[in-house]
Image: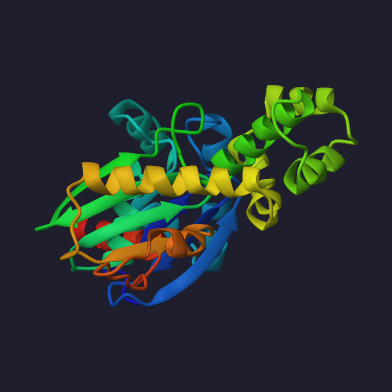
């Protein structure tokens, strides 16, 4: 590495945590770091602090790198120019671009090819790239969106559990397990919901996904139905492949599979996409 060589920092920040990497001009990774949750809508100050802590680890590994690098941050909850500018103002890099996590996720997953990306982790969105133009639906946050995500599934599981408690549905395996998590006290669920973050709801998703009862299957089915609607809204057709990513992405494949539909593995991660966008900006 020469003193005049441009270095690049990429950040992939989500509701569960953030990942940071430093690359040289040839695309070699020089350092990596991990940090805490980085959704700038649900906790702006906490997200910025977690990213800065991870950047401190990068700086410790390669002194001076963070300040001199060109950076791109793809963050959950970065849904407005004002929020993106506010995050960038707190970062130490000499040049720093901030976007939502959709552009970095799509860039990393598809590389140069066209296709649709169904990103399903703590949050969710569906993106489609055709002719180099990227459009997306969803990803507005758990309060009003993020259908099919881990947080959405966990919250839906609690809602269905309380309906079962009220006698509106049978108390099946999912409801029994979720109630057990809260000491068989429905009021404890209400107290939890008063302060729960997306990552807290997401931690309950495995209970729903692994339960073998109609209520749990209905929740996952509703998530799959929304994904199909999103693809239709974006104009997806079978000429374009589908890429399922995130912790929950593969769980939906059987629900979405049909004749003529082509699934592809992701070429890279959202962190790889952040590097590609940082290098492009430079």
Question: How many numbered badges does the structure rendering display?
Answer: 0
Position of 244 compared to 137: left or right?
right
- Residue that appears at 40% across and 45% down: 225
- Residue that appears at 81% across and 43% down: 176
Task: Note whether 243 is above or below 218 in the view shown.
Answer: below
Residue 262 locus on image (x, y percent) = 28, 70
Task: Note whether 56 is above or below 163 in the view shown.
Answer: below
Q: Nearer the viewer, residue 65 or 199?
A: 199
Q: Quadrant of the N terminus?
A: bottom left
Position of 13 compared to 195: left or right?
left
Residue 196 locus on image (x, y percent) = 67, 31
Q: Quadrant of the C terminus?
A: bottom left
Q: Nearer the viewer, residue 136 or 43?
A: 136
Quarter location, residue 234: top left
Position of 79 compared to 15: left or right?
left
Question: Looking at the image, which residue sits at the far left?
Answer: 131
Scheme by which the image is coloured: rainbow
Is residue 6 something that shows in the picture?
no
- Residue that appears at 24% across and 69% down: 260
Residue 152 locus on image (x, y percent) = 55, 39
Residue 141 locus on image (x, y percent) = 46, 33
Q: Nearer the viewer, residue 271 or 202?
A: 202
Quarter location, residue 244: bottom left
Task: Note whether 84 is above or below 111 in the view shown.
Answer: above
Is residue 115 something that shows in the picture?
yes
């Amino acid at each position: 590495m020469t003193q005049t060589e441009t270095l690049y920092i990429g950040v992939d920040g989500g509701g569960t945590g953030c990942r940071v990497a430093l690359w040289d001009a040839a695309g070699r990774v020089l350092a990596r770091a991990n940090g805490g949750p980085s959704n700038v809508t649900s906790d702006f100050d906490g997200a910025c602090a977690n990213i800065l802590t991870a950047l401190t680890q990068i700086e410790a590994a390669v002194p001076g790198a963070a300040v001199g690098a060109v950076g791109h941050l793809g963050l959950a909850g970065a849904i407005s120019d004002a929020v993106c500018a506010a995050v960038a103002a707190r970062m130490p890099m000499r040049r720093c671009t901030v976007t939502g996590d959709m552009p970095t996720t799509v860039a990393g997953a598809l590389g140069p090819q066209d296709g649709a990306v169904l990103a399903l982790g703590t949050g969710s969105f569906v993106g489609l790239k055709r002719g180099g133009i990227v459009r997306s639906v969803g990803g507005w946050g758990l309060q009003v969106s993020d259908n099919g995500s881990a947080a959405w599934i966990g919250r839906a599981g609690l809602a269905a559990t309380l309906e079962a408690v009220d006698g509106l549905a049978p108390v099946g395996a999912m409801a029994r397990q979720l109630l057990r998590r809260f000491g068989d006290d429905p009021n404890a669920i209400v107290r939890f919901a008063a302060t729960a973050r997306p990552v807290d709801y997401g931690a309950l998703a495995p209970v729903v996904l692994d339960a073998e009862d109609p209520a749990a299957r209905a929740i996952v089915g509703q998530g799959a139905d929304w994904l199909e609607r999103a693809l239709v809204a974006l104009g997806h057709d079978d000429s374009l492949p589908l890429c399922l990513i995130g912790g929950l992405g593969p769980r939906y494949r059987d629900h979405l599979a049909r004749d003529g539909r082509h699934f592809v593995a992701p070429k890279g991660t959202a962190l790889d996409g952040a590097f590609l966008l940082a290098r492009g900006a430079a």
